[in-house]
Amino acid sequence: MCNDAGAMKQQLLSFQEIVARYRRGENLFDITIEKWTGIKDSFRSLEQLAEVGPIIKSARSGGAFCLEYLDNCLICPLERWCKDPQSTYQTIIKLMYLYASSGHKDLKQRTVKHVEMFLEELEEYKEEFRSRLH
């Protein structure tokens, strides 16, 4: 459980950490899944509404796939999640902002559930993508 901003920040991958791991050649899906697991854990353990800002910033910041497909979003494997206004990712961002502005616990729970769904989708897509390569 995360009781202070320092512990929360340890769970959130910074963009600099993502860049470093990308440059080391780590798997893009693994980096992305770790990023979103940290976001989920941080959001779940929120105790004060003031702590939501860094989590939203992390969720909205670019990830490993953004580095790989910089100006070529249309060929990025995750493009459908980023660009589709009805996607799980876009729903998560909307729910985070709604929670930040209202503080309703229901919105917090819904956000965590949607992040869990997003992580499941990423895991499934990682396996699908891997099977296409072999």
Image (cartoon, grey):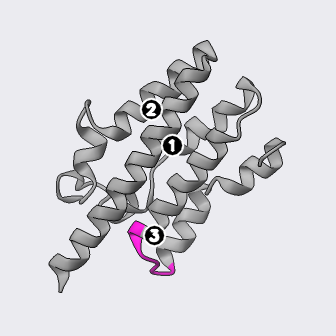
Main SS, magenta residues: loop
Residue ID for mark 1: 59
Q: Is residue 125 above or below residue 121?
A: below
Residue ID for mark 3: 30
**Residue 35, horizontal then vertical, whole percent:** 53, 57
Work out how far the residue at label 1 is from the one at label 3, CA to CA, in angstroms. 16 Å
Q: Indicate which disc residue 93 carries.
A: 2
Q: As rendered, which of 110 and 102 lies closer to the eye?
A: 110
Tell me the element at label 1: helix
- Mark before the other along the chain sequence, 1 or 3: 3
**Residue 82, horizontal then vertical, whole percent:** 31, 43
Residue at 37% x, 31% y is 91
**Residue 53, horizontal then vertical, whole percent:** 65, 32
Three-letter code, disc 1: Ala
- Could you tell me if the residues under marks 3 and 2 are in contact, i.e. CB atoms within 8 Å? no
Tell me the element at label 2: helix
Locate the C terminus and report the quarter of the image it occupies.
bottom left
Q: Callout 3: few (<14), some (14-19), or many (20+) C-alpha neighbours within 10 Å?
A: some
Question: What segment carries the magenta color?
Answer: 24-29
Any magenta on residue 96?
Answer: no
Q: Judge left or right: residue 114 versus residue 108.
A: left
- Mark before the other along the chain sequence, 2 or 1: 1
Work out how far the residue at label 2 is from the one at label 1, CA to CA, in angstroms. 7 Å
